[in-house]
Amino acid sequence: MATLVRRLNLQDEEAVVRGILAANPPLILAASDLHLGQGRYIDTGVYDARENFFMDEAFGRWLAASPRKPGERLLVLLGDVFDFTRLCDLPQSSASFQIWSERLEALQMAKPVSVLQQDIVQAEKWFGLRTNEHKSIWKLYRMIDGHPKFMRSLASWLEAGDTLLMVKGNHDLEVHWDGVRQAFRHELVRNGVEAAIAETRVGFVQSSFNLANLYFEHGHMYEPMTCVKGPAVLPGDKEINYPLGSFLNRYIVNKIERLDPFIDNIKPVQDAVLMLLRQKPLRILRFYFRAWRFLWRVAEQKRWRSWTTFWIMVGLVLPPLLVLFGIAVLISPTLQESLKIVHKIRAALTAGALGFLLPTLLPYLVGAAREVGQILHLFHPRDHVAEGAKGILEKMANLGMHKRVYVVMGHTHRQDARSFKRNGVETIYINTGTWIPLWPKNRQDLIGKTILSFASFERGADGEFLHQCCEWDDEAREARPARILRTPVGF
């Protein structure tokens, strides 16, 4: 196969993004967190068990129905479009290695089949390929092959004269590699897009960008588990610098999702894990010992103070401690006598007034403890993304350049809109939500549903953009205003 598009470095990408923004399009559509995985298997047509994105056809219909004339529209995919952390499969057959080698050759990164086969280590057979550039390219093509209609929809959008910006999130950090971005453009060309269009109307944003009164960013850098500490690439220029949350996906979540495909959609994750432990304890035990690699990453990145890390550590460390304690009780007469005394004290309390009152008071005590924990941000996680957005909005308002300013983010999977005033400027935080199934704890009406959420921004006569939070109704083939409940805790 011939090379169809140029290999653009990060400086070239910045120039492409500047060119797209300089056109100042009248309409911007923003969506995020599509989380494309391995999609459908080509031979059988069934989905991979860890797939979350099932809206390829709906995505195409949404783009085709968007208002404004072609050439006046910018599509912003605001991070976590491709979910590199979700892939665990490896190339298995000689034919699959041959295809991988041919694709790398087309990208001017020739690697013989024998080299690719020898380059896979034992840990990758358990957890999937690492983040070296050529391995990230294989993962991207695996996702593209599983979602051909998604790529054709983007190709149609570009052929019509419109533009596309892809913002990097924490699940698609591998778009840092020049070869990954080139492979994406290469695939657009295979779907009918001219090479010159793929090189000039498709831009990759590594962090954030501004346009008029709008600021766009994925939002993962404000959450402790997902923020990237240090450079994008580890020393030696070999692998991507993953945040701790990505290792959580790699070593724990991906394995558990074989038992429950949507466990990563349930928040908090520990609730779903506890349910699986009760239902399938033997299967969970198979993944337990390999999950200890996560603690190695915790030590490596010195992230001991995260509450999420703490509870995961408790879940990994407590079982062997309980087993050791049980063994000690069996072999130690002293411990056995101590436990008899504890049993007598408990019996006395049970026989007393407390034994009658505790069952009645316990639900209220637990509820009160939970509320105190939420106030102190112990049991209820803070919305780090919204807090980060507020800080940016305050800086934008202090500049005094616009009467209304927006910060648009994704990452949380919760479509949201919040506003406050600062120095007479209206400041608005927009979250674009997600296109994968939801299991929100505070929205029983949305459990198991997929809300095709997005944000629309139209430029007014004064040059500033006005927003609308929307949902795509695929049955009616039209967009409608989003149904967002007001966040109880404001800015």
Image (spheres, rainbow, N blue to C red):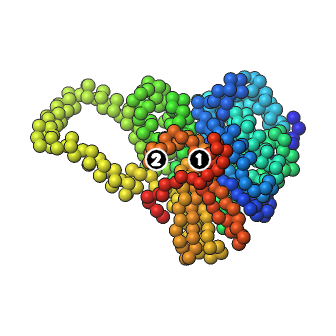
- Residue at the outermost right position: 2
Mark 1 touching mark 2, by CB under 8 A? no
> At label 1, which amino acid type do we have?
Thr
For residue 38, what is the image quadrant?
Answer: top right
5 is higher (above) or lower (below) than 39: below
Where does residue 40 sit, x and y in percent of width and height? 67, 30
- The tag earlier along the polypeptide, 1 or 2, is 1
- Relative horizontal placement of residue 400, taking residue 113 as reference (left or right): left
Report if residue 199 is visible in the image: no
For residue 355, what is the image quadrant?
Answer: top left
Report if residue 400 is visible in the image: yes
How many residues crowd mark 1 within 10 Å: few (<14), some (14–19), many (20+)?
many
Which one is nearer the viewer's eye here, 59 or 392? 59
Where does residue 319 sit, x and y in percent of width and height? 38, 33
Dot label at residue 196: none
Question: Which residue is depicted at the point 41% across and 33% down?
Answer: 275
> At label 2, which amino acid type do we have?
Arg
Q: Nearer the viewer, mark 1 or mark 2?
A: 2
Question: Which residue is depicted at the point 20% across and 33% down?
Answer: 339
Where does residue 434 sit, x and y in percent of width and height? 59, 47
Residue marked by disc 2? 443
Residue marked by disc 1? 434
Question: Which residue is depicted at the point 20% across and 29% down?
Answer: 336
**Label 1 element class:** loop
Question: Which residue is depicted at the point 27% across and 45% down?
Answer: 363
For residue 322, what is the image quadrant?
Answer: top left
Where does residue 476 sit, x and y in percent of width and height? 64, 44
453 is higher (above) or lower (below) than 36: below
Which one is nearer the viewer's eye here, 119 or 193? 193
- Relative horizontal placement of residue 391, taking residue 165 as reference (left or right): left
Quarter of the picture containing the N terminus is top right
